[in-house]
Image (cartoon, rainbow, N blue to C red):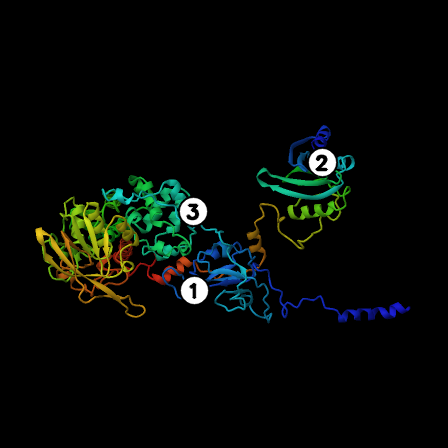
Amino acid sequence: MKTIYEDLNKRFTMSGYKQQRDDLAFVTVDKDQLVNAITYLKDYHKFTHLAFVTAVDWLEENEFQITYLLHNYELKVDLGLKVRLDRDNPTMDTIHHLWKQARVYQRELHEMFGIDFPGSPGVNDPMILESWEGPPPMRRDFDTKKYSEETYDHRERQHIEPEDHLRKQLYPED
Amino acid sequence: MNLKDVLSPLYVWKRAFEKPYTIRTEKEPRPGADRYRGFHQNDTEKCIGCGSCAEICQNESIDMIPVSETKDGDSGLRPRIDYGRCCWCALCVDICPSSSLTMSNAYTWIEEGLDKDTRETFCFTPGVDEKPWDNDEKGYRRPDGYDLSLLERVEMEELSPAERVTSFIEMVKGFSKEQAKREADRCIECGICTATCPGHMDIPGYIRAIREDDIEKGIEILYKTNPLPGVCGRICTRRCEDVCSLSLRGEAVSIRWLKRYLTDSAEAGKYRDLLHDEVVSSGKKVAIVGTGPGGLSAAYYLLRMGHEVEIFEQNEAAGGMLRYGIPEYRLPYGSLDNDINFIIELGAKLHLNTKVGKDISFDKLYKEFDAIFTSVGLTDSYKIGIEGEELPGVTTGLTVLKAVTMGQDPKLGDHIVVIGGGNVAMDAARTARHLGVDVTVVYRRRLEDMPADSDEIKEAIEENVEFITQGIPLKIEEGANGKLNFIWGKAEMVDNGSGKRPSPVLIEGSREVMEVTKVIAAIGQGANYGWLEGETTKQVKLGKRNIEADRWGKTDDPKIYVGGDMFNKTADAISAIADGHRSARAIDSYLAGEEYPKDRF
């Protein structure tokens, strides 16, 4: 793993290498170099399998992070590539030309986080949120309760506070 | 068309004889796993309606609705669950203080009729609305050893019995900041305590203030309903702790000690800064007779409402029973003085050594003041009613306690007998132990029947007070060397049928003699209305036990109000404080020309 990383590091701008287990490591790559780095790993280091693509909302830092997890069947190791995007303009280059299934992940990230992948087929189509009108629901500033109150009808609660009730019953005049 | 095309529709028929894959949930239900989290069950007898389930529910799927009668420690509400919102997380089961709420492993419910209101089909009250799974054994229960609540108290440090009998130093040491915060963490804020407290103190509120380390806010909350928090933080009868929902499975939150922690942590001189609201003078004058908790509480609230207050006290210091009835090791005079001084500093005019009816007439008060609040307590000790009671060595618990408070030697000798099982009896007995006297307590009934606080009984036993239960005093005779012979007999408990407590009946021929130096009677007190004389008191009616008044303490004369032990049935400090607060509000309304206060506490 370390040697693969050293080889990568010569070619690309990388930071924060972390060896999590013997067979798992993560590294952060520059946004502009990510597709090149993945292509290099796939073609030269036999990371032929894309395990998943996922995102994290770093609200306080005003950034999204996308993580690509790649697998090497020969060495039986995983390498995660992390990339940080500006939260105000979340756009990332597509990788569907390397793995066809990437478009499904990218479509999902677009729906749930609002991250755009221009050129990825069907990236604007909804996956599960048909006729959704609110902001992307996986963003951390999405207020689930507020959205549900504004969007759906509710049965009115009949709740009575035990403290008030008990007091009114036991001491009606107080 | 070939043969295959003709036959292929018929191939389908071969499936007709196979077992179908369809699951008929209605007719052949598939049971959930043993610990599946299915529909709720609630043991409504065990449930106290504290609403912790509704509070913890992340989906607001639980409503507390009135189902049964409200009684002490039971709100009468029961949880109704909206299964359109429930996500089956079982937090409600995990938090339930009474363990009444559980989940069955049933997960299917089919209801006919789409035209019904969803409220009827999606919501029900477990244990009240009958369901087939009500008595199912299987399903989710809180696992043993797993609890969201902290069931054990932070231990309070106390002086050992051997240490404490050597002096009158306060025996309970009080919480440190860390201990108090840890204890405050245990409160689940159900509010059953607030409803039960006669003064309706916002207990969860000030416990939260402790948790957030905001002492000033805590003191502010205390003073909203109780102007003697330093006193109540030590000697309150704490009915709040009796009903604390945590006490169902563990130990009640130490509410009293937390209150004491707040008052101990604040600087007494700074209390005034915490009262932010402006007082507008009304120009009215109110007289208060008696400086016990009732009188002091009324004085404080009347002052805060802008009325001029004058207080009349027959003794040389204010405090009433708090000072002369409660021993120093339970309530140090310094703590009592802190609370009283603050009220006096707010502007109350205190007349000490002034007995109404002797030094000043009730008529004069009636003429000079716009309203009068009286709370003089129960001062006359009951007689034992046996031969020899008039002998010089026979005295009362209150006399002994008062003498010790005033720094006098009660001259008890070396072995006394105390008759009675209430708090005054315990206080007198323990005070005698602290003075190095041997003490025997004689009580008519059993130990568990004693009306005294259980802590006091326990501590008396620790301090080597000897208890004789089911003992009936028969006679007191003069003995040798100026001593007394106390003669008593053993009683047996006779059942009085269900609902009534058994009564002690003397075993015929039983007769024991004990040689003692003093006999102390502490079997309760009655009121003395000798002072209530004059033209202006005619409208005030005396009831059997106390003065007749409505819930606000208002007598038939709307200018005269009563509170405290001479009025309420519970006869404890917090009830007197609540009476003072209630009457102060009623007086305020009366002085403003309104009949009764509109707002609640």
Quarter of image, res B269: top left
Indicate which label's residue lies in the foreground, 3 or 1. Answer: 1
Mark 1 crowdedness (10 Å alpha carbons): few <14, some 14-19, many ≥20: few
The number of discs equals: 3
Q: Are marks 2 and 1 on the same chain?
A: no
Q: Which mark is residue B45?
A: 1
Report the amino acid beneath label 2. Leu
In the structure shown, which secondary structural element does the residue marked by tag 1 occupy?
Answer: loop
The answer to which of B345 and B242 lies nearer the viewer is: B242
Residue A55 lies left or right of residue B45; in this view the side is right
Q: Is residue B191 left or right of residue B551?
A: right
Residue tagged 3: B185
Task: Please identify the quadrant where the C terminus of chain B is shown.
Answer: bottom left
Give the class, few, some or many, for how many residues have Cα within 10 Å of label 3's Cα (few <14, many ≥20): some
Kindly identify the residue that appears in the image at 67 percent across and 44 percent down. Answer: A54
Give the crowd class for mark 2: few <14, some 14-19, many >=20 residues within 10 Å. many
Earlier residue among tags 3 and 1: 1
Of circles 2 and 3, the one toward us is: 3
* Type of amino acid under label 3: Asp
> Which residue position holds label 2?
A34
Chain of the residue on which disc 2 is drawn: A
**For residue B135, side relative to residue B246 (left or right):** right
Location of residue B183 in the rendering, given as x and y in whole percent from the top left corner: 40, 46
Front in this rendered view, residue A13 or B422 = B422
Label 3 residue SS: loop
Q: Secondary structure at mark 2?
A: helix
Q: Is residue A42 above or below residue B50?
A: above
Q: Quadrant of the N terminus of chain B?
A: bottom right
- Which chain letter goes with mark 1? B
| Same chain? Circles 3 and 1 | yes
Q: Name the residue nearer the viewer: B139 or B388.
A: B388
